[in-house]
Amino acid sequence: DTAVSQTPKYLVTQMGNDKSIKCEQNLGHDTMYWYKQDSKKFLKIMFSYNNKELIINETVPNRFSPKSPDKAHLNLHINSLELGDSAVYFCASRGRETQYFGPGTRLLVL
Amino acid sequence: QKEVEQNSGPLSVPEGAIASLNCTYSDRGSQSFFWYRQYSGKSPELIMSIYSNGDKEDGRFTAQLNKASQYVSLLIRDSQPSDSATYLCAVMRDTGGFKTIFGAGTRLFVKA
């Protein structure tokens, strides 16, 4: 059983396109996150939702819009993709002591 | 100044040696401290958490925290080639959202 799953695993697309990444957790946690990890491996928080409510919104271009239909799901929609959006995007779910990360979505914008 | 700073490495140690990884943080209000391990192409996984000053041991891993110096370290005893990975230091403060800030990571190579 996968605790935190993301789809797709890989995403290759052209500049200017719009794409979505989906995340689901089956751990029963209330809090979920989106992180971006760039080519230098720096992992940076983007958003956090607690029970469908946005609680952390870092300085992220408004082309990025998270959506949480229920507390088990947190999706990320990206409009007008740019070259600099190329990175690995990790979804995470927060338990009592730590966060559990999904496998990541490798996004390449050409 | 970065919020969480780590030496990017790479840190190379021979098999069986002690690997010492260091991290400093800038927010004195940080409450929780973590070490994650990330293998190439994989997601981060928690190996140690520490919340109060002093040492915390778990198997071959020891985390050390000194809040006065704003310093966290991880010692890996009897290093194995399978320990070769990037180690991410993370600090968390509950600002209403349990925001976790990660360092850029230290790459560790354990030579057989």
Image: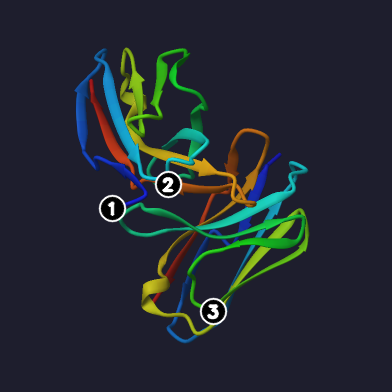
Disc 1: which chain?
Answer: B
Color style of the picture: rainbow
Q: Disc 3 on helix, strand or loop?
A: loop
Tell me the residue at 33%/47% (across/down): B104
Tag in front: 3 or 1: 1
Q: Disc 1 on helix, strand or loop?
A: loop
Residue A85 on image: x %, y %: 42, 72
Disc 3: which chain?
Answer: A
Pick whichever of labels 2 and 1 is earlier in the sequence: 1
Q: Which residue is mark 1?
A: B1
Q: Disc 2 on helix, strand or loop?
A: strand
Disc 2: which chain?
Answer: B
- Give neighbour class at mark 1: few <14, some 14-19, many 20+ (Cα, 10 Å): few
Q: Quadrant of the C terminus of chain B?
A: top left
Tell me the residue at 32%/35% (across/down): B23
**Apparent side of residue A42 relative to residue A96 in the rendered image (left or right):** left
Q: CA distance from mark 2 to mark 3?
A: 23 Å
Residue A91 on image: x %, y %: 58, 54
Residue A99 on image: x %, y %: 59, 41
Q: Which residue is mark 3?
A: A62
> Between residues A29 and B84, which one lies in front from this camera angle?
A29
> Between residues A73 and B82, which one lies in front from this camera angle?
A73
Tell me which corner region of the image, top left, top right, bottom left or bottom right, holds residue A77: bottom right
The amino acid beneath tag 3 is Asn
The amino acid beneath tag 1 is Gln
Residue A101 on image: x %, y %: 57, 45
Q: Which residue is mark 2?
A: B102
Compared with A77, B64 (above or below) is above
Tell me the residue at 60%/41% (across/down): A100
**Apparent side of residue B48 relative to residue B75 in the rendered image (left or right):** right
Tell me the residue at 21%/39% (across/down): B9
Tag in front: 2 or 1: 1
